[in-house]
Image (cartoon, rainbow, N blue to C red):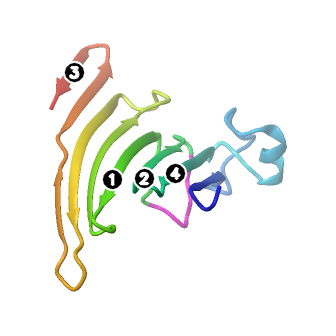
Amino acid sequence: LDDRLDIGGEVAYSVLTADLDAPGPAGSNIPSWLGSVADANISSSADVAFSLDGKYAFRESGTLISSSFRRVGAGYSSPGAPYLRKDNMRFEGKVEQMFLQRQMSVAAFYKRDEDNLQNSKPYGTTVNAFGAQVALNYRNAPYFRFSYAPLAQLSRIMIASLNIETDV
């Protein structure tokens, strides 16, 4: 496709045991064959994280369309990324149009974040954001970016005695 299409992704499966001396066997979220290989016990957690990205460039018109999807499971843990938010997913889509030999661009995008996908917490949040962006990148001059991205956030508390839902 003459380098117009770019597709990428990543999949990671994690089994993390917090206490090696905890009693076994592993919980039900770990496959039995993997639990025996990883010495899993009741303090072990396992889940998957993955992402998928795609871009397509219409070179004749200077248009770029891109999208991405990311999901991190509730039980996913990685010592290499200790502050990674768990139990969430994000979708992003963007259309960008270039002008003046790629020195100016106009873009529109949509993002959606959602957490508590597996109802592992008593609360959850969903964020939707639509936006527009203008960029000026004139050669031998400072660049200028203007972005407008209002968002709508919905927070939920899912406790029977506290049925609360807030919109921001």
Foreground: 76 or 139?
139
Identify residue type, mark 4: Tyr
**CA–CA distance in space, label 4 to label 3:** 39 Å
Of marks 3 and 1, the one in the foreground? 1
Q: Are marks 4 and 1 in contact (CB under 8 Å)?
A: no
Range drawn in magenta:
76-82
User: Which residue carries the number 3 mark?
Assistant: 165
SS at badge 2: strand
Residue annotated with mark 4: 56
Task: Point out the frontmost of discs 2 and 3.
Answer: 2
> x%, y% of residue 159?
31, 19
118 sits to left or right of 137 = right
Q: Badge 1 local density, few (<14 within 10 Å), some, or many (20+)?
A: some
Q: How many marks?
A: 4
Which residue matches tag 2?
64
x and y percentages locating residue 17 in the rendered image: 64, 54
